[in-house]
Image: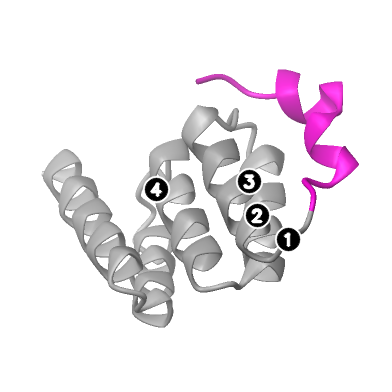
C-alpha cells in the first residue's frame, strides 16, 4: 500500500513539475512527508528539476541542501537539473556542490 502511494505521489510531483506547476508539486511533496512516507532522491530530484525549469534556483538549492542533510546522495540527474537551471540563467554551479561533503554523503 505505501509503495503504491509513493509511486502515485511521485507521478503527481513529476507531472506538476514538468508542466511548470511547481507550487502544486511542492504541496504534493509536503503531503508525502506529512504522511510519513519515505522521500527518496528521485522525488527530491523531480522537484529540484521543476524549480530549475521555472528559474527558482534558490528553492532548488535549498531542497538540494535538504536532500544532502537527509543523507541522500544526489545523482547525475540531480546535478544535471541544477546545471541546466543555472545555464538558463548564465550562472555557475556553486562550489559547495563540488565538495566531498556533498559528493560523498549518503547512498544512492
Label 1 with label 2: CB-CB less than 8 Å: yes
**Mark with earlier residue (4, 3):** 4
Q: Say which residue appears at 60% left-offset and 28% top-offset.
A: 73
Quadrant location of the N terminus in the rendered image:
top left
Q: Say which residue appears at 36% left-offset and 75% top-offset.
A: 20
Q: In the image, is residue 87 above or below residue 105?
A: below
- Which residue lies under the disc numbered 1? 90
Horizontal placement of 19 versus 38: left or right? left
Q: In the image, is residue 106 above or below residue 88?
A: above
Whole-percent x, y for residue 21 in the image? 35, 79
Crowding at label 4, few (<14), some or many (≥20) Cα neighbours within 10 Å?
A: many
User: For residue 87, which numbered disc appears in the image?
Assistant: 2
- The CA span between labels 4 and 3 is 18 Å
The colour style of the image is one colour
**Residue 31 on the magenta span:** no
- The CA span between labels 1 and 2 is 5 Å
In depth, the one of 37 and 48 nearer the eye is 48
Q: Nearer the viewer, mark 4 or mark 2?
A: 2
- Which residue lies under the disc numbered 3? 83
Magenta range: 92-108
**Mark with earlier residue (4, 2):** 4
- The CA span between labels 1 and 4 is 26 Å
Q: What secondary structure is marked by label 2?
A: helix
Amino acid at each position: 500500500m505505501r509503495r503504491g502511494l509513493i509511486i502515485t505521489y511521485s507521478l503527481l510531483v513529476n507531472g506538476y513539475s514538468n508542466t511548470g506547476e511547481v507550487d502544486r508539486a511542492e504541496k504534493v511533496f509536503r503531503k508525502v512527508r506529512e504522511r510519513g512516507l519515505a522521500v527518496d532522491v528521485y522525488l527530491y530530484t523531480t522537484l529540484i528539476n521543476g524549480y530549475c525549469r521555472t528559474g527558482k534556483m534558490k528553492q532548488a538549492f535549498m531542497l538540494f541542501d535538504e536532500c544532502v542533510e537527509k543523507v541522500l546522495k544526489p545523482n547525475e540527474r540531480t546535478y544535471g537539473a541544477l546545471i541546466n537551471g543555472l545555464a538558463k540563467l548564465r550562472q555557475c554551479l556553486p562550489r559547495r556542490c563540488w565538495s566531498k561533503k556533498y559528493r560523498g554523503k549518503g547512498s544512492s
